[in-house]
Image (cartoon, rainbow, N blue to C red):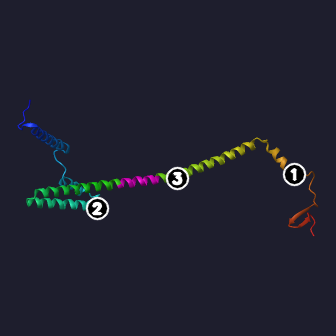
Amino acid sequence: MIRLPCAGWRGAAAACVGLVAVASLLITGRARGDDPPNAQSLLPSLEADTAHRAVTADAIRASRDALERATRLRTAGDEAHARLAEGLALEWAETARDLARAADAEKREHEIEVAAIDAGARVERERALLEAAIARAGRLATELQAAQQGSAKPRDRTAIESRKAPPAKSGPMDADAPTTTGPGTSRPKGNAR
């Protein structure tokens, strides 16, 4: 059995609380990694990002100001407030990073919206072309049906033309028959008066 230096249940409880605290510090230290994020590690990459400079400029400036304030406070011997200022600097740096990510997301969203509008316009054009093709196919089907019905009649052209043509006169043309030379005038051929 393990003997605790403190006697009684109060000592055992204090030892357990201490073990839990040490374990939680070890776990959170491992979860964060060896080098917890700080403003000084985030700011160089944010400042180098020229694409988002307009969006992140104010947050980066506030982070730099908070870092300078932390340095002044640490020089003055106020470690507690220096840590708070460093925490503020980290918050501003993370805000700048989040603003850059939001700007990227908005850009992607805009590109997707433009692509969707273009796709909608393409669909409308394709639908119009399809409707025109369907209408043309309908007209062609009607013409084909009419042509097939017309081909069911006799194919002999002379038989069709003989039905339509007036009967021909027999005999030579009369020399004295009147001919028309203009509206309302008729003269016999050969009589010159």
Q: Which amino acid does label 1 sit on?
A: Pro
In the rendered image, the residue lying farthest to the bottom is: 193
Q: Mark 2 points at which residue?
A: 54
- Residue displayed at 86% across by 65% down: 181
Image disc number at residue 124: 3
Q: Is mark 1 on a helix, strand or loop?
A: loop
Q: Which amino acid does label 3 sit on?
A: Glu
Query: For the residues marked 1 and 2, what is the alpha-carbon distance in whole angstroms?
Result: 93 Å
Query: For the residues marked 3 and 2, what is the alpha-carbon distance in whole angstroms?
Result: 39 Å
| Residue 18, quarter of picture | top left
- Who is closer to the viewer here, 112 or 36? 36
Q: Which amino acid does label 2 sit on?
A: Ala
Q: Earlier in the sequence, mark 3 or mark 1?
A: 3
Image disc number at residue 166: 1
Q: Earlier in the sequence, mark 3 or mark 2?
A: 2
- Position of residue 187 in the picture relative to residue 55 (left or right): right
- Who is closer to the viewer here, 184 or 133? 133
Please tell me how crowded label 1 is: few (under 14), some (14-19), or many (20+) other residues with Cα within 10 Å. few
Q: Badges 3 and 2: C-beta atoms under 8 Å apart?
A: no
Q: Badges 1 and 2: C-beta atoms under 8 Å apart?
A: no
Residue stretch in magenta: 106-118
Q: Where is residue 73 in the image (x, y as percent from the top left)?
A: 11, 60
